[in-house]
Image: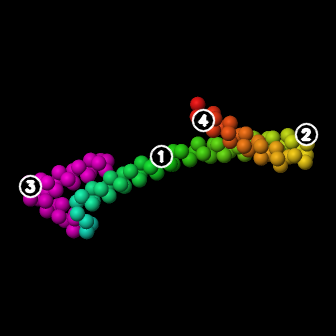
Amino acid sequence: MSGKELASALVKMATSPVKADRDAIARIERECQMDITTITVSLENSELMAQALIQDISRKPETLKIFATGMFWGAVIGIAMLFVRPPYAVCGAFLGIAAGVSGRVAWTEK
């Protein structure tokens, strides 16, 4: 049951003509020390937070791939520069990192 379904079920119970439903809602309100509308709003907010976290977690492996690609090409170009022009090896490594990151970002956008 999702947060929206649970919130709508609580609202239905709160407006129900059945005394047991109203008593159950009153017990929930006493236990939470909030009224039913505040409880339903917090349920919806919790669901939005959970969805945002799930999206953030699913995005992290892509960020790691971008970082790893940049470090790989930085190392490759830095080692190559050691053989070609040793004083420029550090500069080559930084350019390799930039090229690797930008290449990976451009590739993932397609």
Q: Is residue 91 left or right of residue 26?
A: right
Circle 1 — which element?
A: helix
Q: Which residue lies furthest to the top in this view?
A: 110
Mark closest to the chain's N terminus, 3 or 4: 3
The residue that label 2 is drawn on is 84
Label disc, if present, on residue 29 of the rendered structure: none
Circle 4 — which element?
A: helix
Q: In which quarter of the image is the C terminus?
A: top right
Label disc, if present, on residue 18 of the rendered structure: 3
The residue that label 4 is drawn on is 108
The residue that label 1 is drawn on is 55
Give the CA distance from mark 1 to mark 4: 17 Å
Q: Where is residue 49 in the image (x, y as percent from the top left)?
A: 41, 53
Q: Residue flagged by tag 3: what amino acid is it?
A: Val
Does the magenta-highlighted stretch encompass residue 17?
yes
Magenta stretch? 1-30
Mark closest to the chain's N terminus, 3 or 1: 3
Mark closest to the chain's N terminus, 1 or 4: 1
Give the CA distance from mark 3 to mark 1: 41 Å
